[in-house]
Structure formats: structure tokens, C-alpha cells
Image (tube, rainbow, N blue to C red):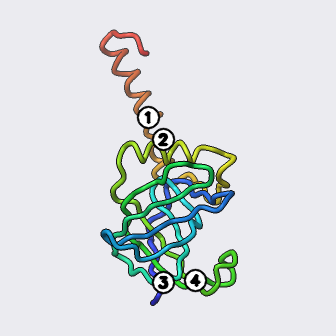
Amino acid sequence: MPEQASTTPRTVRRLVPRQSATVAVYRGEQQVGYGILANVSEAGACIVTDTLMAPGTDLRLKLSFYQQPRLFETIARVVWSRDATPADRGFDGLRLHGLRFTVTSTVERSRLVALLQKDDSFVTVFKPSVTEFDRLASSLSNELDALGEKMDKNLGRESV
């Protein structure tokens, strides 16, 4: 199957577990695979399995993180899937799947965010750079502040 990659730029940092993290993959109630978590973010994950999972497929995941007594459970959609290569950290012969979390309870999302903030558990492998939107928002912020000051002055109020 050809690689299908997202063209949307990443907006959240991506982390690699320092210790092994595993994932059980279900379609409905039926387990269809078992794998290793290659990397994870608040928005999704990349998992390694020996099972083919087509892009667009919705899956239920149960992730087990090192020294965490409870599983992290969520629903995710396969965004892309490809064969691993020798450059993929020794996963040659297996399959990599990019997943976007689609349904995560507030409690589970809070647990994941707290877990991802533990520097002793993960290594940051991608941190988003400043985007054109960030630059525009920053420049507009300065202009809007200046405009607000002018309006306050014209209305006889003191700027905050």
C-alpha cells in the first residue's frame, strides 16, 4: 500500500517514550493487533505493528505506558500507513501507522497531557516552529494594543 501522509503541518510537540510503551488495537470489540508506541502527542500517535490498517479506519486503542498502573484508552483514526524501513529505528519489516485521536474523554485527555509533561518519561523529537500564523498574530497583537491605547485616549480613559 502506498504511503499516505498528511500535508497539514504539525502543531503539537511529538515525543518518544524513554521506556517501551505498548498498544492493543481493537476494531469495535475485536482485538486486531498489538504493537509498540513509536511516538505520541496530545493529538495522536505513531504505532508499529505487523498488521495492515488502512487509512480512514477508526480504531479503539489501549495504551500501556511504563510504570503507569492504568491504561490510556482512546478512539483514533488511521491517517497514514506505510512499511517501516531500516531507517525506522529497527522496525524494518513491520508497519508504521499514523493515528489521530478522535474521541478522548476529558479525564483521559488530562491524564495524557500530565503524562506527556514528565521529562523523565519522554524525549521530544519534534517541536513546532513559529508559523506564519504565529508571526501574523504577534504583529496584529501589537497593532491592536496600539489601537486600543488610541481609543482609550480619545475616550478619556486610562490604558491598562
Query: How dense is the environment of label 3, judged by Cα within 10 Å: few (below 14), some, or many (20 and up)?
Result: few
| 142 sits left or right of 154 in the view | right
Which dot, 1 or 4, sits closer to the camera?
Answer: 4
Residue sitting nearer the eye, 12 or 81: 81
Q: Is residue 72 above or below residue 113?
A: below
Q: Calculate the distance from the C-alpha at mark 3 to the C-alpha at mark 4.
A: 14 Å
User: Badge 2 is on which residue?
Assistant: 139
User: Badge 3 is on which residue?
Assistant: 3
Task: Choose the circle earlier in sequence order: 2 or 4.
Answer: 4
| Marks 1 and 4 close (CB-CB < 8 Å) | no
User: Badge 4 is on which residue?
Assistant: 94
Task: Tell me which residue sits at (65%, 60%) in the image.
Answer: 125
The amino acid type of the residue labelled 2 equals Ser
Task: Tell me which residue sits at (39%, 81%) in the image.
Answer: 54
Q: Is residue 50 above or below residue 77?
A: below
**Residue 119, position in %: x, y?**
67, 46
User: Badge 1 is on which residue?
Assistant: 143
Circle 4 SS class? loop
Q: Calculate the distance from the C-alpha at mark 2 to the C-alpha at mark 4.
A: 46 Å
Residue sitting nearer the eye, 51 or 3: 51
Task: Choose the circle earlier in sequence order: 1 or 4.
Answer: 4
**Residue 70, position in %: x, y?**
50, 49
Task: Choose the circle earlier in sequence order: 1 or 3.
Answer: 3
| 50 sits left or right of 54 in the view | right
Which dot, 3 or 2, sits closer to the camera?
Answer: 3
| Marks 2 and 1 close (CB-CB < 8 Å) | yes
The amino acid type of the residue labelled 4 equals Leu
Q: Calculate the distance from the C-alpha at mark 3 to the C-alpha at mark 2.
A: 38 Å
The part of the image, by quadrant, that contains residue 13 is bottom right
